[in-house]
Image: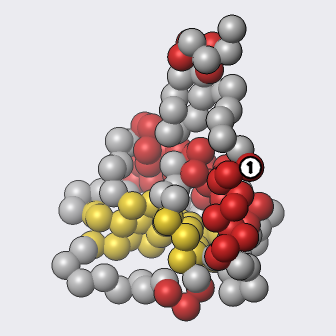
C-alpha cells in the first residue's frame, strides 16, 4: 500500500481523471469511465462507510485504478483498508509514516479471504 503524508496529497493530477466520492455516495451510481483514481473520504476514523465503497469498487465494479483513502486516516486502519481494496492512504497530519509502514509487518497473512486474496486460507492449502 502506498502511504502519503498529509501534505503530499494532491487533488489535481495532470492527465488523470480523479473522482472524489463522499462517504454517502453509492459507487454503483457513478460513471467510472476514464477514471484513474478515486479518493474516498473518512470524515472521522470511526466512520467506516468508505470501506464498503472500496469493496464495491474492487469486487463488484471491477475498478482497477487507484483507490485512495483521505480524511481522518489513522495508522490503525491501514491493514483493514488494504484488505478492503484501498491501495493508497493519505495519513492524518499527526500520524508517522515510518510507524504506519510497520503495521503491514505485524500481520503477514489472514485466514479469511478479502479483496486482495478472495480465497480463504483453507482453500489455498495454507491451513491444514
Residue sitting nearer the eye, 54 or 79? 79
Label 1 Cα crowd, 10 Å radius (few <14 / some 14-19 / many 20+): few
Q: Residue furthest bottom?
A: 7
Residue sitting nearer the eye, 5 or 12? 5
Q: Residue at x 77, y 61 (%)?
A: 76
Residue 97 picture location, percent across and down: 65, 76
Is the C terminus in the top left, top right, bottom left or bottom right quadrant? top right
As helix, strand or loop, the secondary structure at mark 1 comes to helix
- Asked if residue 86 lies left or right of residue 101, the reply is left
- Asked if residue 96 lies left or right of residue 125, the reply is right
Residue 34 picture location, percent across and down: 21, 62
- Asked if residue 67 lies left or right of residue 83, the reply is left
Residue 21 visible in image: no
Residue 93 visible in image: yes
Quadrant in the picture for residue 90: bottom right
Residue sitting nearer the eye, 21 or 70? 70
Q: Residue furthest right?
A: 46
Q: Residue at x 54, y 16 (%)?
A: 124
Q: Residue at x 66, y 41 (%)?
A: 108
> How many circles with numbers are drawn on the protein?
1
Residue 117 picture location, percent across and down: 51, 32
Quadrant in the picture for residue 71: bottom right
Residue 106 picture location, percent across and down: 74, 49
Q: Residue at x 67, y 15 (%)?
A: 127
Name the residue carrying label 1.
Answer: 106
Residue sitting nearer the eye, 27 or 15? 15
Amino acid at each position: 500500500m502506498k502511504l502519503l503524508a498529509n501534505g503530499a496529497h494532491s487533488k489535481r493530477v495532470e492527465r488523470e481523471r480523479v473522482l472524489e466520492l463522499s462517504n454517502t455516495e453509492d459507487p454503483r451510481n457513478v460513471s467510472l469511465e476514464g477514471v484513474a483514481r478515486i479518493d474516498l473520504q473518512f470524515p472521522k476514523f470511526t466512520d467506516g462507510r468508505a470501506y464498503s465503497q472500496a469493496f464495491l469498487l474492487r469486487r463488484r465494479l471491477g475498478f482497477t485504478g487507484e483507490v485512495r483513502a483521505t480524511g481522518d486516516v489513522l495508522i490503525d486502519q491501514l491493514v483493514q483498508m488494504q484488505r478492503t481494496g484501498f491501495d493508497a492512504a493519505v495519513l492524518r497530519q499527526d500520524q508517522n509514516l515510518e510507524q504506519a509502514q510497520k503495521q503491514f509487518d505485524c500481520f503477514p497473512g489472514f485466514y479469511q479471504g478479502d479483496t486482495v486474496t478472495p480465497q480463504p486460507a483453507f482453500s489455498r492449502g495454507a491451513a491444514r
